[in-house]
Amino acid sequence: MTVYILVFAGALVLAIGATPLARYLAPRLGMIDQPSARKIHTRPVPRLGGAAIYVAVLIAAVVLGERYRFAQFGSIVVGATGVSFLGLVDDRWGVRPIVKMVGQILAALLLWATGVRVGTFHQPVLDLITTVFWVGYITNGINLLDNMDGLAGGVAAIAAAYFALMCAFSGQYLVGALSVAVLGACIGFLFYNLNPANIFMGDSGSLFLGFTLAAIGIKLRFPENVTFVTWMVPVLVMGLPIFDTTLVIISRLRRGLNPLTHPGKDHVSHRLVAAGMTQREAVLTLYVVSFILGMLAVFVTQASIPEGYAVGGLTALAGLYGLWRMERPPFWSSYPSRQVGAPDAKV
């Protein structure tokens, strides 16, 4: 527990201190998100906050490095650094979606090569495909969720907190320490990112957080439970970004749009605002949803097989209903795709 507290406090203080520096450097490096008709914010906002998050987590990770299994620790750090760098380049100059996708696949393959891999099926090919799919979906899920002040950072913090809690239950203190490093960095960043935000994390931050959380989810172990139940745990913890990404993909395909290349104000957060919520209310509502999903994940770790599958099945049914309901008024109304815009130019 002492290690948890020290790592959390260190990451928190580093993020609180590094974020103003990132905000100062951003305009000098051309890292400014300009307002436009397709974005929510109405004034120029620096978008170098991801660098502060990265530094805060990385320093905590380096402290852990001597005690962590180096190959796996190194693959997580190198992979997260790679996707974060691609996000940084995208924030400054723009990067084609296919390039970012290839980078994420390579980073996922690096995880696989060092043993950070999904082992649900016990078939190498299926487990490899699942690992790459999981890493890509969660990495992009957090990236896509970064569409309102405080949303991605808050949801990532909640997920990291639950991962840390479950690591403590299972005795995975080093993986848990990495989780609390993410938690501390996110909370430190949120001091400056809650509505009205004076800095954005940008793709460098959201891709970094998504990749790191995906890797932590893979590393979760529950010795007392069977694999075919506990695979649901990281899925539930990351349920909100999974739901949001799935909703966006289905919605855009229904409208004949390419989900990878057509941005839009069609995320869950935008639909809640369309239904009458303020941005703050929408973000708080999604925090609550993430908290509830995390509680269900904790329950699954302690539940019997029938209980675990009952929770998973009911949650899946609720998710399917949510996908159907979110495509209808007051959350959604048909309008020409040319009017669709993204608040932060994300897909």
Image (spheres, helix red, strand yellow):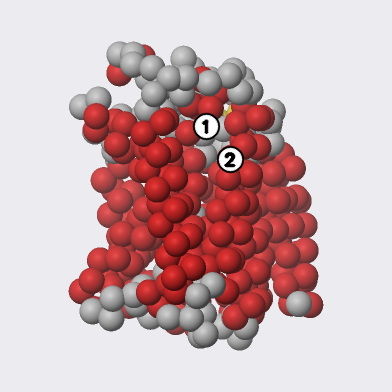
User: Is residue 52 visible in the rendered structure shown here?
Assistant: no
- Given the image, on which type of amino acid does mark 2 rest? Leu
User: Which of the 4 quarters of the picture holds residue 2?
Assistant: bottom right
Query: Residue 35, image x and y in percent?
Result: 53, 20
User: Which of the 4 quarters of the picture holds residue 200?
Assistant: top right
User: Is residue 294 visible in the rendered structure shown here?
Assistant: yes
Q: Foreground: 204 or 230? A: 230
Q: The residue tagged with tag 2: helix, strand or loop?
A: helix
Q: Residue at x 38, y 17 (%)?
A: 333
Residue 139 lies, with reference to residue 28, above or below; the image says below
As measured in the structure, the alpha-carbon distance from the residue carrying label 1 to the one carrying label 2 is 8 Å
Q: Residue at x 58, y 45 (%)?
A: 289
Q: Residue at x 25, y 25 (%)?
A: 255
Residue 289 lies, with reference to residue 167, above or below; the image says above
User: Which of the 4 quarters of the picture holds residue 136?
Assistant: bottom left
Total numbered badges shown on the rendered structure: 2
Query: Residue 286, image x and y in percent?
Result: 58, 40
Crowding near the residue tagged with mark 2, few <14, some 14–19, many ≥20 C-alpha atoms within 10 Å: some
In the rendered structure, the answer to whether residue 151 lies left or right of residue 13 reads left
Q: The residue tagged with tag 1: helix, strand or loop?
A: helix
Q: Foreground: 209 or 277? A: 277
Query: Residue 332, image x and y in percent?
Result: 41, 22
- Given the image, on which type of amino acid does mark 1 rest? Ser
Instruction: Name the residue carrying label 1.
Output: 269
Earlier sequence position, callout 1 versus callout 2: 1
In the rendered structure, the answer to whether residue 126 lies left or right of residue 69 reads left
Image quarter of the C terminus: top left
Q: Residue at x 57, y 74 (%)?
A: 302
Are the residues tagged 1 and 2 within 8 Å (C-beta)?
yes
Instruction: Name the residue carrying label 2.
Output: 286
Image quarter of the N terminus: bottom right
Which disc, if any, is residue 309? none
